[in-house]
Amino acid sequence: MSILSWVSVLSLLAILYSLFLLIPISKRNRSAYLILLSLAIVLYGGSSLTYLIRPNSSVVIRWFNFTSLVFIISSLFAMIRDSKPIFARFPSYLIYLPFVTLLFFPLVVDQTVITNLLLGTFQAGSILVAVMMYSINHIKNGKNLIQLIGVGLFFGALIIFWFTPLNLENKTLISELLVLTGLLILSVGIRKKYQIK
């Protein structure tokens, strides 16, 4: 087994632990933000499981990764909607607007350059929105510092994967470890924020 296969095993364990932390909160609050975030983590786990079973299935892995990003962006839309007063909220169906991109993804899934551009843009956009939202919420109520640290690790993974001259295996290894650490920190922060023990 290669080192990236072991990272996939570690990824699955981290994902299971994150889901263990988030699913009770999602069940209790029935928040679209938490439910969509949990589903995004499940889909990310699907990409790790696919890599573990069939490492050469890059199209399936891209599908899982892209769909996971769509769920993340929708969860951020839900967080933005929930942060507004009731009279200023946009309609709830607009939360699911990013899912429209899934209709067009099959047209470009075989073209590596366009797929990478989409993945990089969605990753950078979701990190930017998450930093802004967690920063604003932290300034308002002081409960989001742990989530900001997790998102900071996602940003580090983004920089290392897309902007460093390392070879692909090393970039993937380092960025996956940063993403897993960020995911665990984010999950712990969300659980702490909602004070479930």
Image: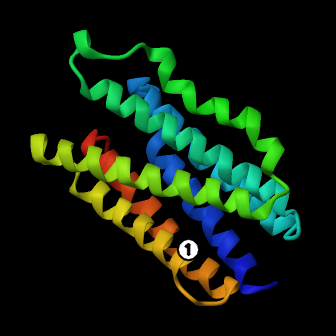
180 versus 124 height, above or below: below
Q: Residue at x 51, y 48 (%)?
A: 20
- Residue at 78 percent across and 85 percent down: it is 2
Amino acid type for the residue under numbered disc 1: Trp
Q: Quadrant of the C terminus?
A: top left
Q: Is residue 171 above or below residue 155?
A: below
Asked whether the viewer can see residue 143, the reply is: no
Q: Residues within 10 Å of mark 1 (few under 14, many from 20)?
A: some
Residue indicated by mark 1:
162
Res 5 → quadrant? bottom right
The one of 175 and 54 positioned closer to us in this rendering = 175
- Where residue 177 appears, as percent x and y from the top left, is 53, 75
Please, which residue is most extreme toward the top here? 87
Q: How many numbered badges does the structure rendering display? A: 1
Residue at the (55%, 81%) spot, across then down: 174
Across and down, in percent, residue 171 comes to: 60, 82
User: Which quarter of the picture shows residue 103?
Assistant: top right
Q: Residue at x 50, y 53 (%)?
A: 18
Q: Quadrant of the N terminus?
A: bottom right
